[in-house]
Image: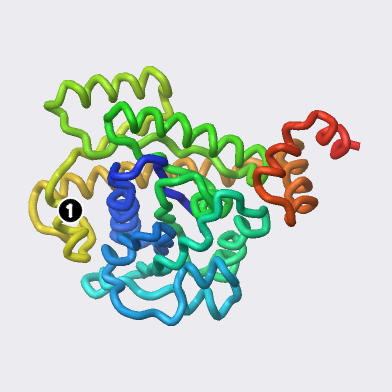
């Protein structure tokens, strides 16, 4: 099972739309797909057609990631009515806000990872829609992930947010989860005829090079129409929607290639040390662990 977070530290860039587009691509390919909705606005849950009252949600899983709670928080998406296969969602809840602590403990950010161990044989890919912040929920998603796809629209503020996101991911990777990596920067809501868009795309390419995903997602009304109707973009009629669906398939291929490379790599000595740090400091806040890791004498002690 591979786990991918879809993130941006700036709201309004179409992060949830990208998460749903990738879920649509994975489902259409026959991959057993789970979407985890950690955004307290719960748009991914709605877009997957999971509407109603639920006994358990992602908020309950983060409170207590026991087997029965995890399974009750996962429901089938209505997308599955149109074609065979597995497409499920761990339903979102505004109550997840209580877990979005700016100073989470290491134990707290590990809970989603613990929850996923209960279902790791049931899915091929897990896609996590994260909030547009760097607090507890986003960090919890990253700790459970193999890769993070950073969504950026071609604007000044998105470029600044991308810098912050990459720095935060790298900091967390070094301290807690060595397998975590940046999948790439996906440019979304592109308007090819807009000069400002072209300037910002070039700026991102100059700054990040190969980290910029080759495929770009253009702004099309069909994406919003499919999402608003609780339909997968692959099942939405029209040439424009099928073109966009093809672009999401290209991004999925990009992710699957990265996962394949990861599975062939053995943990390094530094990564094994990081795992020891994690076990030692489960009761500390994440910021305390980051401070500990930056102390040279701490590393000397661990190497002895």
Other-residue count near label 1 (Cα within 10 Å), few / some / many at <14 / 14–19 / ≥20 = some
Q: Nearer the viewer, residue 122 or 156?
A: 156
Q: Nearer the viewer, residue 239 or 284?
A: 284
Q: On screen, 254 above or below 27?
A: above
The number of numbered discs placed on residues in the rendered structure image is 1
User: Residue 266, image x and y in percent?
Assistant: 68, 42
Question: Could you tell whether 249 is left or right of 6 in the image?
Answer: left
> Residue 48's quadrant in the figure?
bottom left
User: Residue 227, image x and y in percent?
Assistant: 21, 59
| Label 1: element kind | helix
Residue lying at the far top in this picture: please name it: 206
Question: Could you tell whether 59 is left or right of 65 in the image?
Answer: left
Q: Tell me what residue is drawn at x 49 percent, y 68 percent.
A: 59
Q: Quarter of the image for the C terminus: give it.
A: top right
Q: Tell me what residue is drawn at x 33 percent, y 57 percent.
A: 23
Residue lying at the far left in this picture: please name it: 238
Q: Tell me what residue is drawn at x 60 percent, y 55 percent.
A: 109
Q: Tell me what residue is drawn at x 40 percent, y 54 percent.
A: 129
**Residue 83 is at least partly visible in this image:** yes
> Residue 178's quadrant in the figure?
top right
User: Residue 97, image x and y in percent?
Assistant: 46, 61
> Residue 187's quadrant in the figure?
top left
Question: Could you tell whether 22 is left or right of 257 in the image?
Answer: left
Colour setting? rainbow
Q: Which residue is mark 1?
A: 224
């Amino acid at each position: 099972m591979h786990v991918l977070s879809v993130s941006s530290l700036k709201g309004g860039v179409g992060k949830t739309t990208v998460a749903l587009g990738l879920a649509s691509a994975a489902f259409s390919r026959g991959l057993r797909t789970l979407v985890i909705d950690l955004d307290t606005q719960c748009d991914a849950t709605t877009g997957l057609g999971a509407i109603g009252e639920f006994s358990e949600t992602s908020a309950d899983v983060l409170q207590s990631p026991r087997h029965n709670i995890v399974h009750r928080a996962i429901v089938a998406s209505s997308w599955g009515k149109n074609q065979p296969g597995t497409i499920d969602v761990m339903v979102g809840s505004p109550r997840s806000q209580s877990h979005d602590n700016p100073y989470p403990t290491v134990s707290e950010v590990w809970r989603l990872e613990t929850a996923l161990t209960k279902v790791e044989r049931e899915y091929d890919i897990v896609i996590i829609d994260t909030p547009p912040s760097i607090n507890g929920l986003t960090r919890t998603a990253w700790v459970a992930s193999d890769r993070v796809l950073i969504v950026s629209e071609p604007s000044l503020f998105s470029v600044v947010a991308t810098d912050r996101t990459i720095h935060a991911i790298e900091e967390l990777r070094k301290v807690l989860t060595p397998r975590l990596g940046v999948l790439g920067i996906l440019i979304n809501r592109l308007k090819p005829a807009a000069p400002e868009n072209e300037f910002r795309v070039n700026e991102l390419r100059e700054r990040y090079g190969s980290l910029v995903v080759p495929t770009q997602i253009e702004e099309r009304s069909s994406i919003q129409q499919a999402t608003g109707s609780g339909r997968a973009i692959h099942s939405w009629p029209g040439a424009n929607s099928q073109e966009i669906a093809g672009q999401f398939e290209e991004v999925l291929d990009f992710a699957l290639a990265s996962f394949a490379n990861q599975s062939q790599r053995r943990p390094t000595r530094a990564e094994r040390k990081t795992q020891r740090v994690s076990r030692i400091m489960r009761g500390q806040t994440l910021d305390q662990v980051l401070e500990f890791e930056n102390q040279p004498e701490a590393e000397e002690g661990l190497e002895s």
